[in-house]
Amino acid sequence: MHTLTFLPLQSAAPQGGGMSGIIMIVLLLVVFWFFMIRPQQKRQKEIRKFREALTKGDKVVTAGGIYGRITSVGDKTFDIDIAKGVNITIDKGSVYPSADEASKDAQAQGDQSK
């Protein structure tokens, strides 16, 4: 009596797929950098230049929504006059040139989150 044994036929995996996979990953990283990281770095550079250029007497709005005029500039802080005889000290990182700039920045952050 003959017994037949069936051996499953396995096809070989396609060769050369590894190189194209690596190229696709590199391409995706380049596209991600070009459209996401690079514009954000440019925006941060512009904001840093703006904040370094602020001087006494400039009108600003803080990140918390407080309007005022710069009375003195420190290394990392600004003193802002928010009312007659009322001065506050804030970090340079939380200053916008005006309400228009603050609303543009908030709108840009909203657009990025979509």
Image (spheres, rainbow, N blue to C red):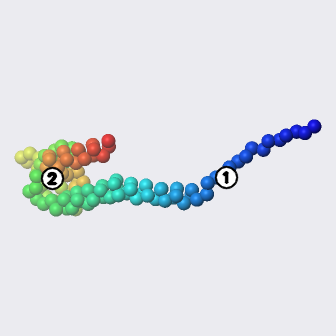
Q: Is residue 47 left or right of residue 8?
A: left
Asked which quadrant contains residue 57, the reply is bottom left
At a point 20% along the width and 52% down the height, the residue shown is 95
Q: Nearer the viewer, residue 27 or 4?
A: 4
The percent position of residue 78, horizontal first and vertical second, equals 18, 55
Residue 88 in view here? no
Which residue type carries mark 2? Pro
Q: Farthest right residue?
A: 1
The percent position of residue 47, horizontal first and vertical second, equals 22, 57
Question: What residue does disc 1 label?
Answer: 12
Q: Is residue 62 left or right of residue 113?
A: left
At a point 24% along the width and 54% down the height, the residue shown is 93
Within-10-Å neighbours for mark 2: few <14, some 14–19, many 20+: some
Question: What residue does disc 2 label?
Answer: 97
If the image is split into quadrants, where does the N terminus sit?
top right
Q: Are the residues flagged by discs 2 and 1 in contact, CB closer than 8 Å?
A: no
For marks 2 and 1, give the one nearer the viewer: 1
At a point 27% along the width and 44% down the height, the residue shown is 111
Q: Secondary structure at mark 1?
A: loop
Upstream in sequence: badge 2 or badge 1: 1
